[in-house]
Amino acid sequence: MDKVLILDTTLRDGEQSPGASMNMEEKLIVARQLARLGVDIIEAGFAYSSPGDFESVKKIAAEVEGPIISSLARAKPEDIDSAAEALKGAPRVRIHTFISTSDIHLKYQFKMTREEALRRAVDMVERARGYVKDVEFSPMDASRSEPEYLYEVLTAVIKAGATTLNIPDTVGYALPESFGALIAGIKKNVPDIEKAVISVHCHNDLGLATANSLAAVINGARQVECTINGIGERAGNAALEELVMILKTHSEALGLDTNITTEQIYPSSRLVSGITGVSVQHNKAIVGENAFAHESGIHQDGLLKDSSTYEIMRPESVGLARSTLVMGKHSGRHAFGERIKELGYDISTEDLQKAFLRFKLVADKKKEVFDEDIEAIVQDEIMRIDDTEDYKLLTLDVRSGTETHPVATVEMEVRGEKVRESVAGDGPVDAAYRTIKKITNTRSKLLKYSVNAITGGTDAQGEVTVRLEEGDIIALGQGAHTDIIVASAKAYVNALNRLEYRKRHSRANLIP
Ligand code: KIV
Ligand code: ZN
């Protein structure tokens, strides 16, 4: 079997999904999970783009064992130097530099001639090689570049020392057949191509990211860049879980394989959607809620007789071995810890204790505690870290009813100082939000508010997601609780803290 390397860019391109920003601790949690998943390379961030990204790349490179850790860098000396500085001292590192090669980008955005872009690419690959042995080069917008010029640039950067050549379909324009042919053309027309690994990086604007990546692999690409749940810029990137399960399901026919521990796919998907707040569509291949749900009577009948009748993969193979009823208020810490491990979370003893106490509270209120409840507890209590400590919700009391005008009384800590206010609203959530807004004296606009019942029943935990906007900064917040007004307030405060963080650390608006 020939190996296809998996480069995961959830922490870089994935983070470019609107509202999906993660802070450093969250990135570290995701990076550790990616290592458990067995990805070959983690693109940990874009070191030069912001102090936050720099620190995240540095911390991940220093602390996460297993995968190669890569930082993105424009083809500019300051970017290469910053990537090298962030990766310094770490055992397995890569610098990934890029510049566009399409005439559209060169003319309108870079304002460069083809010759200037080629020279810059070579110089920056050489500069990166001065720091590290492993250098990836991407000709951005490759799928809309003239193939002859693309071959020339690739030939030159191989000479300059590039070890991976990544061919991006930056705007998701390519068709599988032509993208496959482009890779075949590169293999045929670029001298010394065997000195580098051919990689692909496909966007999903036409829903073809996975198909295009597969076509590339069939034509000789041996690295695929993808993200968990396919998150990423605009319509996202190729979804890791799709590519990996295609290669596994058809491994014999394709003669290809990956290093991924597929049983970690589902836990990774849940972790990333929990941390970023970007939910997975129900019918999403591999990790969607319905991906292994059989509704039709004929299908159910077939499945009961033999699962191969209607299942091309076993749910267990992607880590979906879920028990329906898990635990209740009599369950002990040991069993709770074991269940958390089975769900794919690796948490410290201290965090386990925190989660267990919260579990006991939930179990007191709910008759049955399901896997989804436990995931919500872990994500709300441990994984969802407020980016700043600017705002803390202390108490919330809301009155409402058919004969009562809703009023909320909220006590918060605002940058260390206790503040209490009461404000009326159109409903209990509105009253709570108006009060929080008054206390925090913030001006953000609420773009989205949604409540999701984590499991069935009136005692279910509610998971609230809010999206706030201030200027050009967007932040998501989440909160879970058996009381949806409390969950709503927690989500709002979480989003406000994220917004503050983003205001201080937002990625610079970099001109290529
Ligand atoms: O989509 C793209 O072209 C990119 C590059 C930086 C690789 O993300
Ligand atoms: Zn991209």
Image: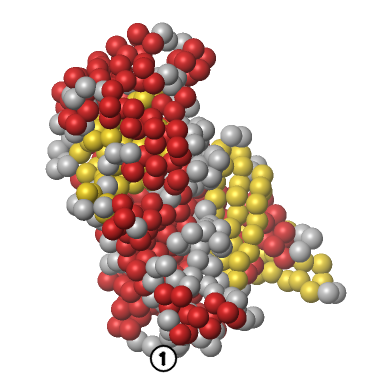
Please name the residue shown 42% across and 67% down the image. 312
Q: Is 80 in front, or is 211?
A: 211
Question: Horizontal and vertical percent for residue 498?
Answer: 50, 47
- Answer with left or right where residue 260 lies relative to residue 458: left
SS class of the residue under badge 1?
A: loop
Residue under the image location 39 percent in, 71 percent down:
314
> Quarter-wise, where is residue 241 in the image?
bottom left
Can residue 77 be seen in this snapshot? no
Camera-side residue: 130 or 447? 130
State the residue in front, 343 or 63: 343
Q: Quadrant of residue 383?
A: bottom left
Q: Given the image, on which type of amino acid does mark 1 rest?
A: His
Which residue is drawn at the image coordinates 43% and 81% (left, top)? 306
Residue drawn at (61%, 42%), measured in percent from left and top? 469
Q: Tell me where residue 9 sits by quadrant.
A: top left
For label 1, the crowd category at 10 Å Cα-Cα, with few meaning under 14, some 14 to 19 and many 20 or more, is: few
Across and down, in percent, residue 186 comes to 31, 27
Q: Which residue is mark 1?
A: 330
The C terminus lies in quadrant: top left
- Cβ of mark 1 under 8 Å from ligand 2: the answer is no
Left-right relation of 249 to 59: right
**Could you tell me if residue 467 is visible in this image?**
yes
Q: Position of residue 297 (x, y in %)?
A: 60, 81
The x, y position of residue 1, in whole percent, is: 21, 53
Q: Is residue 176 left or right of residue 486?
A: left
Up-down relation of residue 494 to residue 113 (above or below): below
